[in-house]
Image (spheres, grey):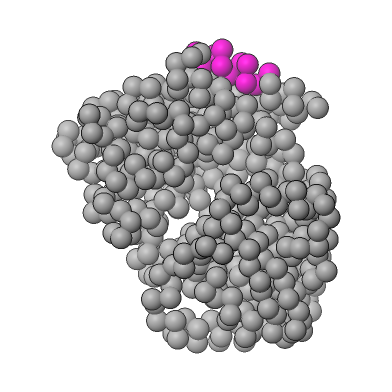
Amino acid sequence: MGATLPGLAMLPRWGFAEDAAASYAKASIDWKQFAGQTIALAGAIHPWSNAITPLLWDFTKLTGIIVTTDFRLETAYLGALPIQLNRGSSTPDVFMWTTYGQGISAGWLAPLNAYYADKSLTDLGWYDESDLLKTARAFPLWSDRERYAVPITSEAVTLFVNSDARTARNLPIPQTFEALLATAKAVKTSAMSGIAMRAQAGGNSSVPAMSFVFSYGGHMVKDNKAAFASPEAIAAVEMFGQLLSQAGPVGVGSYEWYHVLDDFLQGRTAMAIDSSNFATDISNPAKSRVTKQAEFAAFPHAPGQASIPFMSHWQACINSKSRNKRSAFLFLLWATSKATSLQTAAAGLATTRLSAWSSEEFKKAFGPQAAAAALTNLQNADVDRAKAILFHPQSRPVMDAFMIGVNEVVSGAKSAKIAMTAAAEKANAVMRG
């Protein structure tokens, strides 16, 4: 698999296992009803796959279901899986997924509401959906109120600050975009950029820039049209471009998330904006040179506007062609239950459970300030704005067009107005088909 197992193996597993076993026993579920079946689980090498892998044997002991895994580098995985599903393959049975609208429109994802309602399979009182983050409850609901996925992680765009760089200039943590720009320019040195963010000309890099658009009052998709040529979105992209052109690292136009994370971990940038899940690595002294200096903060806001960072949940889906849908759903119930989530949270995984987020084990692994900042940003997020772009069947080409325009602004090739107008026209042409 190539996945590095997390620190969960170093924790007192017997205590976790005993508590979890007691919790599973309380469920009105016949855990052994599919004993002897085998399900295939596929996904990206990711904090979730790293955290769930050490627990798979516990699932097999509980249910008698064997789980085989195929975890790959994210880019390779996301490129290969649609091809496999489009061929009508019955495996994998369960898989990590992001492009929800594409999967539903193509018929690749099995609807799940009937499984939730099946009392021979699900004990909703034990599962306790009220313990889920409100974004996790709302996120998988499709327009027809059907659910085709189960959220497995939670993340929201967060501001990371190197306190040494900030306090050397006697500056506060910036709360507005104007303050962010002033701070980034003030702390930039020949050895350290003022701020790092993704700016590569591809949809996978769109997360930070979309947060700017939302927080300036704009939308990515509205009324089934690309909306990033609006005055709000243009102003947002103009600020994004100013930050990176005036205070960003050399070559930022090619930056993906791992470049941003590495720069912050190595102390090469004073600030960074990206996924709250960066906190696991930032808080790990074995990976980070700035563990003691790292500060975690709310995403900035524009004058008179609320902060609306982009948020998302990685989701797990069941293959519509799977021959083992019921056992696959039992796996998803187990994997996202309170008991299992407490164990994966102890490895630093940002789960979908309030109980896991409030656990001392999670706060220790993720960092208490990082956990508080991530929760703040999740609570400030607008699920509907995020879903409008993420769940659109043409989400990837729309985000690609958007980020090509953003990249042109960062490089200085075009003004924000010209770049965003052209990008929206290109995206709308794709959406019209």
Residue drawn 46% across the image and 64% down it: 4
Magenta-highlighted stretch: main secondary structure? helix
Q: Is residue 223 left or right of residue 287?
A: right
Depth check, front residue: 250 or 293: 250
Is residue 397 within the magenta segment?
A: no
Specify the quadrant that holds the C terminus: top right
323 is higher (above) or lower (below) than 272 = below
Residue 140 visible in the snapshot = yes
Q: Quadrant of residue 56?
A: bottom right
Residue drawn 63% across the image and 73% down it: 334
Residue drawn 76% across the image and 79% down it: 37
Spot occupied by residue 226 in the image (x, y as percentages of width and height): 67, 26
Spot occupied by residue 413 in the image (x, y as percentages of width and height): 48, 14
Residue 215 visible in the snapshot = no
Q: Is residue 297 left or right of residue 111?
A: left
Residue drawn 77% across the image and 53% down it: 85
Spot occupied by residue 179 in the image (x, y as percentages of width and height): 31, 28
Q: Is residue 164 left or right of residue 240?
A: left
432 is higher (above) or lower (below) than 329 = above
Which residue in the rendered view is the most extreme toward the front?
2
Specify the quadrant that holds the N terminus: bottom right
Q: Which range of residues does the magenta coloring cover? A: 415-425
Q: Is residue 114 left or right of residue 410?
A: right
Spot occupied by residue 107 in the image (x, y as percentages of width and height): 83, 50
9 is higher (above) or lower (below) than 267 = below
